[in-house]
Structures are given as C-alpha cells and as structure tokens.
Image (cartoon, rainbow, N blue to C red):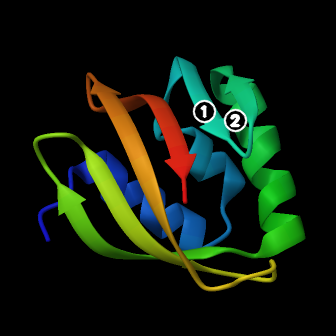
C-alpha cells in the first residue's frame, strides 16, 4: 500500500503511543474530528491523542488506502468496546502535513 509519508508516520507514532510525535504530523492549525468532538490546533490534538492513548491503547493496522480521496481504512484495536473495529480516516493534506482528519466507523 502506497501511503503518503505523513500518514505512514502517523500510523507509526500511533502504534508507539508517541503523542508528541503524532501531533507533529499535523499542521499548526489542523483540525481533528473524532467521536463527535473537534480538536483545533496541534496542542489540542496532542492532548486528545495522549488521553486517547492512555484510555484505549489503540493501534492501527492499515488495510486499504484510497489515494484519490485520501481515505485510510485501518483495523483499530485497543481496550475499547467492540475492539477491533475498522475505522475510516479522512485526511486533508497540505505541505506534507495533515490539515484535517475525520475519523468514522
């Protein structure tokens, strides 16, 4: 699967539970939409993923990537009800960083 570098890095940092490195994959003004909540800017994104890592210990296994739409499907496993689950990650990329990410089931 041919993932953009920043998405490969995001998966790697998620699987290593490295919240600071995860946040660095995003533009300073990036936005994340997950579980009905919006997280604005790199600092909020780092706080969100740090809490998520502690609560769920989720790992990602990419299973499909739509290059045209920038949509990653990944088997996501962790300590949450229904694990593992296939989630879709909708990316908007800009200048080698993630500008927005929406996560859905």
Residue hosting label 1: 32
In the image, is residue 49 above or below residue 61? above
Residue hosting label 2: 45
Q: Residue at x 73, y 50 (%)?
A: 49
Residue 55 x %, y %: 89, 68
Farthest top residue?
Answer: 29
Mark 1 Cα shell of 10 Å, populated few (<14), some (14-19), many (≥20): many
Q: Residue 47 vs residue 20: left or right? A: right
Residue 28 x %, y %: 55, 18
Q: Residue at x 19, y 40 (%)?
A: 69
Image quadrant in which the N terminus is located = bottom left
Q: CA distance from mark 1 to mark 2?
A: 7 Å
Q: Residue 50 vs residue 16: left or right? A: right
Q: Earlier in the sequence, mark 1 or mark 2?
A: 1
Image quadrant in which the C terminus is located = bottom right
**Residue sitting nearer the eye, 2 or 68:** 68
In front: mark 1 or mark 2? 1
Q: Residue 42 vs residue 57: left or right? A: left
In the image, is residue 53 above or below residue 98? below
Q: Give SS at disc 1.
A: strand
Mark 2 Cα shell of 10 Å, populated few (<14), some (14-19), many (≥20): many
Quarter occupied by residue 17: bottom right
**Residue sitting nearer the eye, 38 or 25:** 38
**Mark number, residue 20:** none
State yes or no: discs 1 and 2 in contact (Cβ < 8 Å): yes
In the image, is residue 3 above or below residue 25? below
């Amino acid at each position: 699967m041919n993932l953009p570098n920043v998405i490969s890095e995001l998966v790697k940092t998620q699987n290593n539970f490295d919240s600071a490195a995860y946040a660095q994959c995003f533009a300073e003004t990036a936005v994340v939409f997950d579980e009905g909540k919006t997280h604005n800017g790199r600092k909020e994104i780092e706080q969100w993923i740090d809490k998520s890592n502690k609560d769920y210990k989720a790992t990602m296994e990419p299973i499909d990537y739509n290059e045209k739409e920038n949509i990653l499907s990944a088997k996501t496993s962790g300590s949450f009800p229904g694990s593992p689950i296939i989630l879709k990650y909708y990316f908007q990329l800009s200048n080698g960083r993630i500008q927005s990410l929406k996560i859905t089931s």
